[in-house]
Image (spheres, helix red, strand yellow):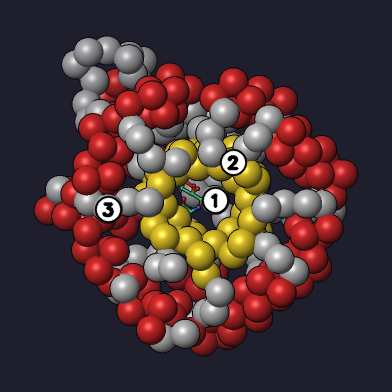
Amino acid sequence: MSLLLGVNIDHVATLRQARYALLPESPNAEPSVVEAALEAKAGGADSITVHVRGDRRHMQDADVFRVKEAVDLPLNLELGITDEMLDLALRLKPEFACLVPETREEVTTEGGLDVTALFGTVREAVNRLKSAGIKVSLFIDPVPEHIEAAARMGANMIELHTGAFANAEDPAEEIERLAAGARLGHGLGLQVNAGHGINYRNLPQLFTVPHLAELNIGHTIVSRAMTVGMRQAVAEMLEGMKGYRSSQ
Ligand SMILES: CC(=O)[C@@H](O)[C@H](O)COP(=O)(O)O
Ligand SMILES: NCC(=O)COP(=O)(O)O
């Protein structure tokens, strides 16, 4: 099975909010997140990822319902563990939900969910989402205790946070941490995904990380789409991902 690509379209909404923050549902509001998702599908995306943040800095609640309605692809909703966001997820009923840490002051997601310190809270959220038929992923750092806790609480998947890898001067150590985490997660029966900061240049460095099922990639694809359009930006990323399986 090929390595799957989840396209995160958050930053299409970032551009829209720059002008239409007060009127995101205006008929004039652009760019359209629905059109972006449809173009991502046309480019070959396997799923669409959207992160509705508590501060609604980019994706709005209405956006994700419209994307789910209009785009025939699995939807992966990223959310913080709050009653408000869990309620949204239970109303939306996406195929997948990925529980992520969130702080209002962060520029972007800065680390993985501390699933050991928050074990009970995370497990309750996992159970509520799974009871609604939603497959649950946990966005975590490649920390063995966190991976083991994810398996123990019944998560379906983990998404290894690749931000430290993406930001590292020399990524060798981070790549080994990710590889060890992927081996452990796979061995525990978890689907192992990865995401955050992956781009067209650093992607091949991840090919030594085994057992990856899916990459969630957004910022670099939306950035590339500024030049070549979303459909081609997605197709180019998929072309780059083709070498993964043969490198395993
Ligand atoms: C959880 C994750 O890595 C992505 O959703 C990332 O958060 C993109 O959204 P932001 O740029 O708002 O962080
Ligand atoms: N969970 C990672 C994601 O959805 C996309 O992150 P990025 O590629 O925008 O950094």
Earlier-in-chain disc, 2 versus 1: 2
What mark, if any, has residue 44 been given in the picture? 3
Residue positioned most to the left = 228
User: Left or right: 25 with respect to 157?
Assistant: left
Q: Which residue is depicted at the point 59% across and 21% down?
A: 91
The secondary structure type at the circle numbered 1 is loop
Q: Is residue 204 above or below residue 123?
A: below
Q: Position of residue 96 (x, y in %)?
A: 56, 42
Q: Residues within 10 Å of mark 2 (few under 14, many from 20)?
A: many
The secondary structure type at the circle numbered 3 is loop
Amino acid tagged 2: Ala
- Mark 2 or 1: in front is 2
Q: Nearer the viewer, residue 12 or 124?
A: 124
Q: Is residue 170 above or below residue 18?
A: below
Residue that numbered label 2 is attached to: 97
Q: Position of residue 233 (x, y in %)?
A: 21, 56
Q: How much space separates mark 2 and mark 1, taking CA atoms? A: 16 Å
Res 224 quadrant in image: bottom left
| Quadrant in the picture for the N terminus | bottom left
Q: Residues within 10 Å of mark 1 (few under 14, many from 20)?
A: some
What mark, if any, has residue 85 been given in the picture? none
Residue 96, visible in the rendered structure: yes
Residue that numbered label 1 is attached to: 109
Res 204 quadrant in image: bottom left
Q: How much space separates mark 2 and mark 3, taking CA atoms? A: 21 Å
Amino acid tagged 3: Gly
Q: Position of residue 83 (x, y in %)?
A: 72, 25
